[in-house]
Amino acid sequence: MMNISLRQMKLDQAGTITAVKVGGYLGQRIREMGLIPGTKVRVHGRAPLKDPVALRVMGFTLTLRNNEADHIEVEVSG
């Protein structure tokens, strides 16, 4: 298994969050959305210009800007 930033994940790729590497308001906001270590995520879609990215997390769809996704490290499966 390998760790990459959430932004680098491909369409329909799944993984588990291993770290949120930002503090302050942005880090708090990301964690409040449920994106914490141990959470499983799957890339559900991308906008035509690749920003934002749509994720499936805990049964709902969440969108993040790429500059937010850069701070989230994911261990991809397969």
Image (cartoon, grey):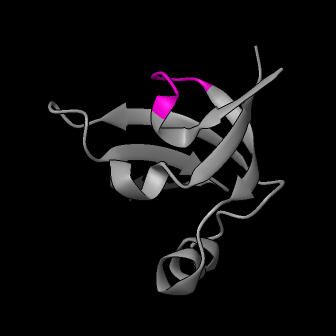
User: In this rendering, would 24 be left or right of 54?
Assistant: right
Q: Residue at x 15, y 33 (%)?
A: 49
Task: Give the image location of residue 13, x and y in percent.
Answer: 59, 23
Task: Give the image location of residue 67, x and y in percent.
Answer: 36, 54
Answer above or below: position of 2 versus 55: above
Q: Residue at x 33, y 54 (%)?
A: 65
Q: Residue at x 55, y 71 (%)?
A: 30
Answer above or below: position of 28 versus 52: below
User: In this rendering, would 24 be left or right of 66?
Assistant: right
Task: Give the image location of residue 31, x and y in percent.
Answer: 64, 74
Span colored in magenta: 8-13
Asked whether 3 falls inside the magenta stretch, the response is: no
Considering the whole magenta stretch, tell me its main secondary structure.
loop
Asked whether 10 falls inside the magenta stretch, the response is: yes
Task: Give the image location of residue 12, x and y in percent.
Answer: 52, 23
User: In what quadrant of the picture does the N terminus appear?
Assistant: top right
